[in-house]
Amino acid sequence: MGNEIKKSSGNVFKDLVLDNPEERLAKAKIASMIYDIIEERNLTQKEAGLILGVNQPKISALRNGKLDGFSMDRLFSFLRALDQDVDIVIHPKKQHEARLNLAYANG
């Protein structure tokens, strides 16, 4: 009968049942940071491309969320090229998350 409303998990890629939703969300967040810096510096896409070592269409893809052609390492290198420090923090999953993943893996 009508549209069903479902509460988001907080990860649109997971909600859409796409492959590697955690990586997709991380890439989207990093790409957003990169593009925010580009805009804060009032750089054109061509100028940003020169700084990042890519052509303008790659900057456009980054801006539009077309991130399949970008590895996490490459996105981190873009941040470094924009004079940003990149720190990676590793910590154990929350117990609830670990249980959900275990149930899914066995499931």
Image (tube, helix red, strand yellow):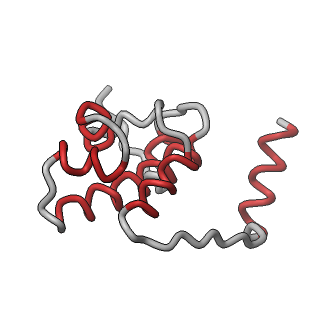
> Is residue 22 positioned above or below 19 on the image?
below
Q: Position of residue 62 (x, y in %)?
A: 32, 41
Question: Foreground residue, 7 or 81?
Answer: 81
The residue under the point 49% across, 55% down is 77
The residue under the point 47% across, 31% down is 68
The residue under the point 25% across, 31% down is 57
Q: Position of residue 67 (x, y in %)?
A: 42, 37
| In the displayed structure image, the side of residue 65 where residue 95 appears, left or right | right
| In the displayed structure image, the side of residue 10 where residue 73 appears, left or right | right
Res 88 quadrant in image: bottom right
> Is residue 83 positioned above or below 75 on the image?
below
| In the displayed structure image, the side of residue 64 where residue 93 appears, left or right | right
Q: Position of residue 48 (x, y in %)?
A: 24, 50
Question: Foreground residue, 99 or 53?
Answer: 53
Question: Foreground residue, 7 or 91?
Answer: 91
The residue under the point 28% across, 55% down is 35
Q: Which image quarter is the C terminus in?
A: top right
Q: Which image quarter is the N terminus in?
A: top left
Question: Foreground residue, 17 or 66?
Answer: 66
> Is residue 60 positioned above or below 9 on the image?
above
**Given the current orientation, which residue lies at the most extreme top position?**
1
| In the displayed structure image, the side of residue 89 where residue 1 appears, left or right | left
Q: Position of residue 82 (x, y in %)?
A: 36, 64
**Across the whole image, how many numbered discs are drawn on residues?**
0
